[in-house]
Image (cartoon, rainbow, N blue to C red):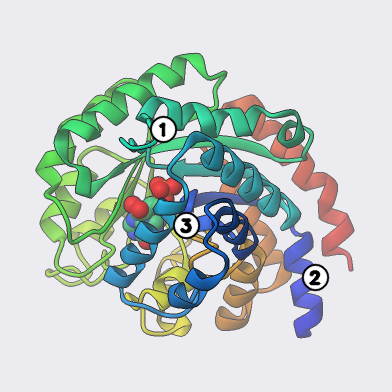
Amino acid sequence: METHTLRDFCQQLPKTELHAHLNGSISDHTLTKLMRRRHLGGQNMTSFEKGRSRTLDECFQAFKIIHKLTEDEESVKMVTGDVIKEFSQDGVKYLELRSTPREEEHTGMTRRSYVEAVLNAIRSPEISALDITVRLLLSIDRKNGAMVAMETVKLAQEYLLTSDDCVVGVDLSGNPKVGHWRDFYPALQVARNTGLKLSLHLAEIPGQDEETQALLELRPHRIGHGTFLKASRNGTSELVEHVRKLKIPLELCLTSNVKCQTVKTYHEHHFKFWFDQSHPCTFCTDDKGVFSTTLSEEYGIAATTFGLSPKQLWDISYNSIDFAFAQHDVKDKLRFTWNEHKHLILRK
Ligand code: IMP
Ligand code: ZN
């Protein structure tokens, strides 16, 4: 397929985005609005240098800068609305956002009011009118320790029952070098046992076999990255076998991994390893703002790197509906929408 035709195809393809961190997904346009609100002009943009490759540690520095711009409920609501609109413009029909409920002493924002701000944006008339279904996972940031992890799960449990099916699960994320899995295990176990869906960042960096093995015992519903599953100490191994046997879907973020330098090149991305074994995989952006990408671009990169046909891209997108954390009736509607688009875009 020619480049421009592929680009159009990927844009028109209905897509599910299952791994998007709210604050990492903020576009340049929205960052500029946030800086204007804080009377910062544009000067911080250059030091931030969005989109360039950086080490994993540098990525986490970038999140710190962004968090300084979203320290109150109004900005959290604004960025949530903008991020959803941008995903919708990119042809995303089902979006699972994830975000860390954050407390900011000097603005008075609490973890609860943070979640409320995100939900208010999702339920606003402007967003409800869009052709996109949005669900929310509450993230446990590894750096915040055991107590905050449990508090986050308690909030998620409460909203699971009271948010009209909007809050559906919990994510474990944050700098993989920080914190010990034993700190999060009890909270994740409570989440797993009380009906919340679990998506865990696993094996994002090498040398975490013990943690990966322990967290896999929780039978997560999906895995974020899983970059070093196949390179674990004992070769292609127990961890791979375990994930394969349980058919745990992988959320794969090509550009994020290459830009954070946990994967050297697109060609070396572990997508190929899993795809060749027909393991359930879905493409995601991770942090479309920080890594300057879109989900359509991720599909395009996968197609050119791995020689995927339009039909294969279609199948990956369609099959991703199976791994969504939404209710059955929502998934049925999504399948209907996909099938409505199918002959229009695959026939071209
Ligand atoms: P937030 O949860 O909406 O504030 O989104 C930003 C947060 O997502 C960061 O502070 C990290 O905790 C998490 N995050 C974003 N990208 C990654 C990643 O690649 N690995 C692990 N955590 C991540
Ligand atoms: Zn992530």
Q: Residues within 10 Å of mark 3 (few under 14, many from 20)?
A: many
* Image side of residue 147 versus residue 122, left or right: left
Q: Position of residue 80 (x, y in %)?
A: 58, 43
Question: In this rendering, is residue 43 above or below 338?
Answer: below
Helix, strand or loop under label 3: helix
Which residue has dot 2 on it?
8
Q: Mark 2 and mark 3: span between their CA atoms?
A: 25 Å
Residue 225: quadrant of the picture = bottom left
Which residue has dot 1 on it?
169
**Residue at image x 65%, y 25%?**
329
Q: Say which label, 1 or 2, has the lower sequence index.
A: 2
Q: Nearer the viewer, residue 10 or 86?
A: 86
Residue 122: quadrant of the picture = top right
Identify residue type, mark 2.
Answer: Asp
**Residue at image x 32%, y 61%?**
226
The answer to whether one can see residue 256 in this image is yes
Q: Nearer the viewer, residue 277 or 92?
A: 92
Q: Residues within 10 Å of mark 1 (few under 14, many from 20)?
A: many
Question: In this rendering, is residue 150 above or below 245?
Answer: above
Tell me the mark number nearer the camera, choosing from 2 and 3.
3
Q: Nearer the viewer, residue 90 or 54?
A: 54
Question: In this rendering, is residue 52 above or below 296?
Answer: below
Q: Say which label, 1 or 3, has the lower sequence index.
A: 3
Helix, strand or loop under label 1: strand
Q: Could you say which disc has been placed on residue 24 in the image?
A: 3
The answer to whether one can see residue 248 in this image is no
Helix, strand or loop under label 2: helix
Q: Quadrant of the N terminus?
A: bottom right
